Image: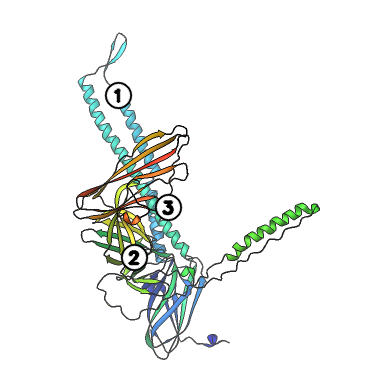
Amino acid sequence: MTDKEDRTINNTISIKASECPVTKVTVYKDRAEVCREINTTVKPGINELRIKEFVCIDEESIRVEGKGAATIAEVSFQSKYVTEDQATMSEKEKALNDQLRSLTEEKKALDLANQKEILNRQWKVLDQFAATAAKSGQVEKKDEQVLFKLDDNYFKGMKEFMKEYKAIGKQLENERLDLERKNEELDRKIEAVERNLNDLRGNYNTGHENRECIVVLEAEKEDKVYLVVSYVVMGASWIPSYDLRMFTEEGSLKIFYYGLIYQNSGEDWNDVKLYLSTAEPSVGGTIPNLPMTQLAIRKPIITRPKSRSLSLRKSKKMQTSRAAAPFNDIGYEYEQEDSFAPQMMMRGMPEMHVMEAEVSESTTSTTYEIARQSTIPSDNTEHKVTVAIIELKPTLSYLSVPKVVPHAFLQAKVVNNSPYTLLSGRTNIFLDNSFVAKAEIKAVAPKEEFECSLGVDPSIRVDYKPLNKVSSQSGLISKSNTTTYEQNIEIKNLHNYAIKIVVRDNLPRSLDEKIKVTLLLPQIDNKHPEKNEKVKLTKSNHLEWDLDIKEMDKVDLVLKYAVEHPASEDVETTLAIGN
C-alpha cells in the first residue's frame, strides 16, 4: 500500500469556491489569474480541505500558499461528472436563465401579431366610416343629375369628422409604433442574455461537472491558517486605451491611460485588487528550434519512352514533396505553459495618495497595479479602469498637407518620462477640452521619444487656391507642349502666439525621359542645400516649407513648375504613396 493509502485523515473541511472571496485578479491579454482567500482552523494530524464547485479553472495552474502553523503536504484536483438532478447550477447562470424566462414571458404577453391585427381592424373600420361619411351629404336632383348640396352644416360636420379622424388615426399609429418598439427592445434584451448565457456555458460544462481542489495540510496543533489559492481562468482579457488632452496655453500634454477589461469567466470579481499584465502566457517560454535549410542541385529525372506517363507522375510527386519540405520543416508551435502564478503579497499595501497604477517590471513583461479596488462582473462587456495619468511637456509644431486636406495638424514631440510603457492602442484626442479626433498610438517605452498628432487646429487657416495653368506649344519639326502650373497657398495664424509649421506639397516626378519637369518657384539650390533655409525638396519629390508665423499674421506660398513633353504624346498622371 502507498503512503497515501496508509494516511489517515483526521479532519475534513468542505467549502464552496464561491464562499472564498476573490481578493486579487491579474488580467492578461487572453486569460486571468484569480486568487481566493481561505481562513479556516486545522486540527492536530492530517487535515483535508476540499474546495468545491469551481465554475471555471485551469487545473494545471492551481497554486496554494499560506500562513499559519501547518504544512501544505499535497495539492490535487479532481473533476466529477454528476447527473442532471445532482448538478448545481452557478448563481450567474441561474440569474441569466431567470432573466431569459422573464423576457420570453413578457414577449409572449405582448402578442405582437395579434395586437397588430386588432389595430389593422380598427384602421379598417375607421376608413370605412370615413368613406360612408363622405357620401352622407344631402343631395338633390336637377335635370336627372345627382348633385351634392354643399351647405354650412355639411362642411361643419366634415370638419369635425376630419379632426376626429386625424386624432384617432394618430393614436392608432402611435400604438402600432409603440408595440414595434417594445418588441424590438425585448428582442435585443433576449439576444443579449442568450449571448451571455452561451458565453458562460462555453467556458465551463454547466451543471454536469463538479470541479474540486483538494489541499492536504499537516498540523501539530489546532490553529487558524490563512491560505491563498490561485488559478487561471479563460474568457478574460484587457486592452489599453488613452485620452490625450493637450492644453495649448499651458503647453502641457496629459495622457489618461486606461485599461479596458472584458471577462465572462462565469463569476463576478467584486471589490478585488486588480493587476493588468503585458505578459503573454499563451506564447509560452520554450525557445523553438531553428531548422537548417539545405540546398542541393536537383538531379534530372531520366524517363523512358515505355513508361513516360508513369515517370511524369513520379516527377510531379517528387517536385511537390521537395517544394513543400522546407515549409513543413520550418513550421512549429509554441509550447503553452500556464505556470505563471505570481507570488501573493501577504502584507498590507501602503495607502496610495495618487490614484494611479504602480508599475513592476520583470525581464519580459510589465504589470500595472490598479490603485483602487475594482468590481468586474462576468458580462463580457467593457469595464474601464485608470492605469495612470501622465503629464508631459511636449514640443509643439504644425504640419499641413493642403493638397490632400486643407487644414493644419498639431503635432507633439515628447519624451515618455514616466515609468509606464505605453502599449499600442486606440486614442481619443482632445485639444483644450474639445474632442477633435480618434487615432492609434504606437508602443512607447519609458524614456523613449515619440510623436503624436493632436488633430486639426481650427485657429490655423489654410487656403489652398485653385490651380492655375497655362499651356503653350513650340518647335517646327518636333513640336512640344509646355504647361506651366502655379499653386498659391495662404497660411493664417489666428493664435495670440507665434507658431512653427511645416507645409508640404508635391512636385511631379517624371518617369520618362520624354517628359521634363522644371521647378520655377521656389528657387532651390540643389548643389548647396544648406542655402535653402526655409524650403527643401525631399527624396519623395515633396516641397517642404519650414515656416515661423507670428501671432495674427499670414504667409503666402507659391509653387510654380513647368511640364514639357512631345506634342504627339499624352501624359498620364498617377499617384504613388511612399515613393
Is 86 located above or below residue 485 in the figure?
Answer: below
Q: For the residue carrying disc 3, how many other residues have a C-alpha within 10 Å: few (<14), some (14-19), or many (20+)?
A: few
Residue 120 appears in the picture as rendered: yes
Is 424 located above or below residue 457 in the figure?
Answer: below
| Residue for badge 3 | 578
Type of amino acid under label 3 = Gly
Does 394 sit left or right of 26 as displayed? left
What is the image's colouring? rainbow
Residue depicted at x 44% and y 62%: 200
Tag nearer the camera, 2 or 1: 2
x, y percent for residue 145: 31, 11
| Residue for badge 2 | 449
Residue depicted at x 35% and y 55%: 529
Residue 22 appears in the picture as rendered: no
Q: Nearer the viewer, residue 199 or 234?
A: 234
Element type at mark 3: loop
Q: For the residue carrying disc 1, how many other residues have a C-alpha within 10 Å: few (<14), some (14-19), or many (20+)?
A: few
Q: Are marks 2 and 1 in contact (CB under 8 Å)?
A: no
Does 281 sit left or right of 425 as displayed? right
Q: Give the alpha-carbon distance from disc 3 to disc 1, as whole Å.
A: 74 Å
Element type at mark 1: helix
Type of amino acid under label 2 = Glu
Q: Earlier in the sequence, mark 3 or mark 1?
A: 1
x, y percent for residue 381: 37, 60
As drawn, the label of residue 134 is: 1
Q: Are marks 3 and 2 in contact (CB under 8 Å)?
A: no
Element type at mark 2: strand
User: Can you tell which quarter of the image residue 272 is in?
Assistant: bottom left
Q: Give the alpha-carbon distance from disc 3 to disc 2, as whole Å.
A: 23 Å
Q: Earlier in the sequence, mark 2 or mark 1?
A: 1
Q: Nearer the viewer, residue 538 or 207?
A: 538
